[in-house]
Image (cartoon, rainbow, N blue to C red):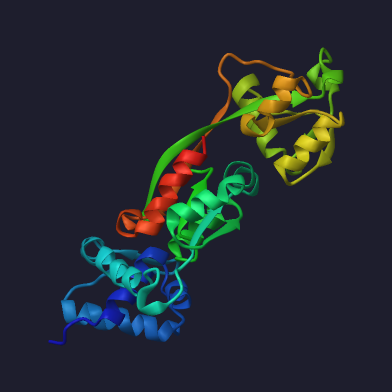
Amino acid sequence: MARPSLDQLRTFVTVYRAGSVTRGAALLGVSQGTASAHVRALEASLGYALFHRDRDGVSPTVKGIELAREVAGHLDAIEDATLAPGAGGAPARAVIVGGATEMLSTMVIPHLAQLIDAAGSPVRLRFGLAEDLLDALVDRSVDVVVSAVPPRRRGVAAAPIYDEEFVLVAAPTWFGTGLEDVPIVAYAEDLPIVRRYWRSVFGRAPDGMRLVAVVPDLRGIRTVVLAGLGMSVLPTYLIADDLAAGALVALDTPQVAPLNTIFLATRGREAQRNPALGAVAAELRRLIR
């Protein structure tokens, strides 16, 4: 019986993480037929099925889960070793950090030199929505993600690092005005952040409110609200100085402020095996607070 090859094992782990032969093949840069052949050959050499197959993709069998747990870390370590900073005179591999534009721009970019020093290698930032970035983490096109949603993906390890607190704010000229009379500046047409605040604090949707502007960047919303256009819900890390200076005022002071937990996500134990990635993760925990 032929022994499994590294190519077969890497294809298996990639398909396992992607949840699809088609997507796994795309990540590996091979055809779907080649990826399927690798998996079938591996199953034949092992003598058992690794995946259940259906129209929606593949899901691992119990044996498949056990094999992935046993070999994935070793395969990642081999890949890390071949991409190690300075190996064979090659340039250091960049660590790619994904996260929301506003949070990384406010908390990380001002200290980017420290992050690079900690890593001992280049650092690249990638902005985007949390779900898209977590997909990129699984795809290995991002190394660590600062995620505003709980990561629920196979092979992803995550830990809470920060509680994002939200405040309903406006320029002082609106203070004392009934909330129903203050126009809303929102991140999107469906008022995602405002709606979450209203349901958490008031137990209802913000129906009947007047939407005056949509600005898909929290820093832009802050600028518009400072100018007096209306009210919005913003995280305290963006507006703490404005509140302290009186440039913005809180229009509502609930007993328990709405919070959103921020997670730091990496692939499995990769941050423990890769010194550069581990250093970046540790520095991000220090900076995002």
Q: Is residue 229 left or right of residue 1?
A: right
Q: Nearer the viewer, residue 226 or 275?
A: 275
Occupied quadrant, residue 236: top right
Q: Residue at x 35, y 66 (%)?
A: 16
Q: Is any part of residue 157 visible from this angle?
A: yes
- Note whether 79 is above or below 62 in the view shown: below
How many discs mark residues in the rendered view?
A: 0
Occupied quadrant, residue 274: bottom left
Counting from the top left corner in percent of width and height, residue 142 is at 49, 61
- Note whether 250 is above or below 229 in the view shown: above
Counting from the top left corner in percent of width and height, residue 237 is at 62, 33
Q: Is any part of residue 51 visible from this angle?
A: no
Occupied quadrant, residue 42: bottom left
Q: Residue at x 55, y 18 (%)?
A: 256
Name the residue at the left extreme. 1
Counting from the top left corner in percent of width and height, residue 23 is at 47, 72
Q: Residue at x 50, y 51 (%)?
A: 115
- Note whether 153 is above or below 46 in the view shown: above
Q: Nearer the viewer, residue 60 or 286?
A: 286
